[in-house]
Amino acid sequence: MKAVVLRDPSARVRVEEVELAPPGRDEVLVEMAAAGVCHTDLHLVRGDWPHPLPVILGHEGSGRILEVGAAVEGLAVGDHVVLSWVAPCGVCRYCLAGREARCSTWGSTIAASGTLADGTSRMSIGGEQAFHYLGVSSFAERAVLPASGVIKVRSDAPLEDIALVGCAVATGVGAVLNTAAVEPGSTVAVIGCGGVGLSIIQGAVLAGASRIIAVDVVGTKLDVARTLGATDAVLAGRGDAAKLLLDLLADGVDYAFDAIGHVSTTEAAIDMLGIGGAAVVVGLPATGSSAKFDPLALAEAERRILGCNYGSIRPHRDIPHLVDLVMEGRLRLDSLVSSRRSLEDAADALDVLATGSSLRTLLIP
Ligand SMILES: NC(=O)c1ccc[n+]([C@@H]2O[C@H](COP(=O)([O-])OP(=O)(O)OC[C@H]3O[C@@H](n4cnc5c(N)ncnc54)[C@H](O)[C@@H]3O)[C@@H](O)[C@H]2O)c1
Ligand SMILES: [Zn+2]
Ligand SMILES: [Zn+2]
């Protein structure tokens, strides 16, 4: 099959011919309908995080099941599916506590090693082992995935568009409803209005937030944010987001979401909190980063800092529900997509995402 391969962070990604082995007992073969290009793929391409190479990129996607392994239950050939980049084991103490988005089995195998759960890969290039990305590798014509990361969804939903539910929407809406559990009437700031930030804004609307203040360095992103429910828009320079926010709302906000992951935006999210406010770190920095905050102010004002992995979702519960919300018109996906391109255009799509000028590109194999 054709797939987008990253061989070296200093080289551009390109489409190569990749051999794909059949699914194992607990695995599923999926024909990809679409894959979204997320900033998390860009982090890998930039070398922000170490990863075994060569790796087939992509962790957001949707498709149809072509084949199921012998032990797979509840999934059948032809099912429409959204891919979850956490494949919960269901039995570790975090899964049992409902923290499936931080399944420790997934964390120590699939996420850590770039393989599937048994420590081996289903992909190779000319006989050389190639690695999975978060057990998904959606920038390809087909993918073999752990069955627990393949989420069956209703077949009347637009199959290409709902690829976005697999990362941007699950992460953004989940950050609001699960991680932060934003209460109706809350004031919310969202720093960064890419695919994730715009999904946070839509989540804040669902939660009944009274003010939703969108912050970005690109004006067109703020225009989209307003159409999705932001009540205010702040065009920031790099580094002055907290000051501009406090000019607008002197008491600070109840919730500030960092949907970028620069040290400066994480610090800004903390600095713009009101009393009892929570900063939610959704954007991801490079390995080894550290941010500063004032612990005295944090304690005295009872502020909180919350980490968010994958919107703290429970994939089998939340992904079908998010697709229902799309079908009810309560979540919009069209506004998050700036173009649809072929796998061959993946390198260009990553370049454009890096400039901040585009939203999600959907790669259609
Ligand atoms: N925690 C998770 O589970 C999770 C899941 C998905 C993505 N992410 C991370 O979330 C972040 C956002 O992902 P995305 O795909 O939405 O990215 P994106 O590139 O689509 O959006 C980033 C936005 O931030 C804006 N921006 C950049 N610098 C800024 C600054 N200094 N101040 C204000 N705005 C600024 C850009 O203009 C752009 O609109 C990335 O770090 C990604 O890795 C985390
Ligand atoms: Zn993502
Ligand atoms: Zn688990």
Image (tube, rainbow, N blue to C red):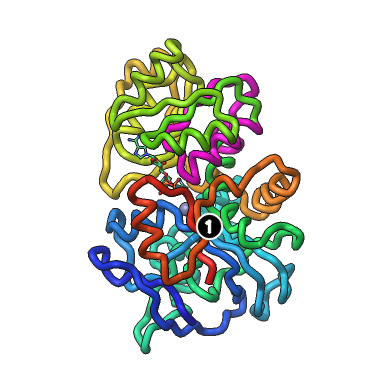
What stretch of residues is rendered in magenta? 177-206
Disc 1 marks which amino acid? Val
Q: Is residue 195 above or below residue 219?
A: below
Residue sitting nearer the eye, 315 or 79: 79
Identity of the residue drawn at 54% across and 37% down: 200
Residue 307 place in picture, x, y as percent:
44, 38
Name above or below for residue 290 compared with residue 83. above
Q: Is mark 1 within 8 Å of ligand 3?
A: no
Residue wearing tag 1: 86
Residue shown at 69% from the left, 47% from the top: 326
* Percent of width and height locating residue 354: 34, 51
> Residue pushed farthest bottom?
127
Q: Is residue 175 left or right of residue 45?
A: right
Q: Ligand 1 shows up in which quadrant of the image?
A: top left
In the displayed image of the protein, which residue is found farthest to the left? 10
Viewer-closest of 158 and 301: 158
Residue 124 seen in the current view: yes
Q: Is residue 198 left or right of residue 258?
A: right
Magenta stretch holds residue 362 = no
Using the rendered view, name the quadrant where residue 303 is placed. Answer: top left
Q: Nearer the viewer, residue 334 or 251?
A: 334
Q: Residues within 10 Å of mark 1 (few under 14, many from 20)?
A: many
